[in-house]
Image (cartoon, rainbow, N blue to C red):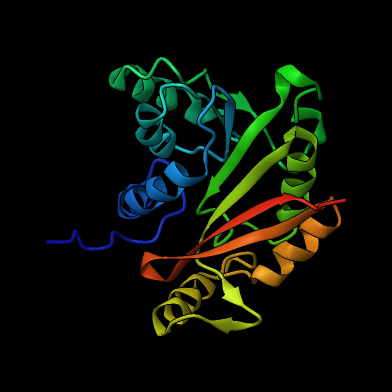
Amino acid sequence: MNQAMPPLDPHPLSEYVAWAGSRNREPLLGVLKEKLPKDPERVLEMASGSGMHINYFAPHFNHLHFQPSDRDIEVFDHIKKVTNEHGNDNIADPVHLDLTDPETWFNPGPEKSFAAIFCINIFQVAPITIADGMMKCAERLLKDDGFLLIYGPFQVHGEFSSDSNREFHETLRSVGVDEWGLKDIADLKKAAAHHGLELKEQIEMPSNNFSLVFGRIAR
């Protein structure tokens, strides 16, 4: 039996976020098994939150080195605790990465380049303006053939892909926080184009979500 949805709470350590994460991790793992490189590489997670996703994925890719990150350093102890409990020795200690502050985006160079970056369930509670920082940061940190995967529910050309997504959007909007609500894939594509990236794949996922795979624009 599926667990009932807890009260909406975007805090990374909330019951709601844990519930949402447990629902999407298996389908996401399937996508990552198709997309992540087969050779040893570095993979960055933006907005790791509690660390639930990176710690679930890492054991399936022992050849990869995973780097968690978040804007809120208060979650770092929890991420390290979960990593230690799972014995995941291919996960580094979390680092501070604020998509609104380029000073936190590492120095460019081979040792700080990533074959893949992923970010899960951020845009329903983050302002769309953060997309510009995300794409600019990805442009700086991705290898030439790397990709950025963004997962979550989105509008498509101003339309909702399901009645449940419309209801979810209205629930988010009713809270009264201006930036809450489902964003449009078109706005992510626009931000990507400003930083040399384009949408390579738009993968439909369970529960009316999407995996959006961005890569560098071919020259």
Residue at 80% in and 21% down: 109
Residue at 56% in and 46% down: 119
Residue at 76% in and 20% down: 110
Residue 130 drawn above or below residue 170: above
Q: Nearer the viewer, residue 56 or 15?
A: 56
Figure quadrant of the N terminus: bottom left
**Residue 125, how many percent across, how many down?**
56, 59
Residue 123 drawn above or below residue 103: below
Residue at 52% in and 38% down: 36
**Residue 29, how many percent across, how many down?**
39, 45
Among the 4 quarters of the image, the one containing residue 72: top right
Residue 12 lies left or right of residue 218; in this view the side is left
Among the 4 quarters of the image, the one containing residue 187: bottom right
**Residue 31, how many percent across, how many down?**
44, 50
Q: Residue reaching furthest left?
A: 1
Q: Nearer the viewer, residue 10 or 115?
A: 115
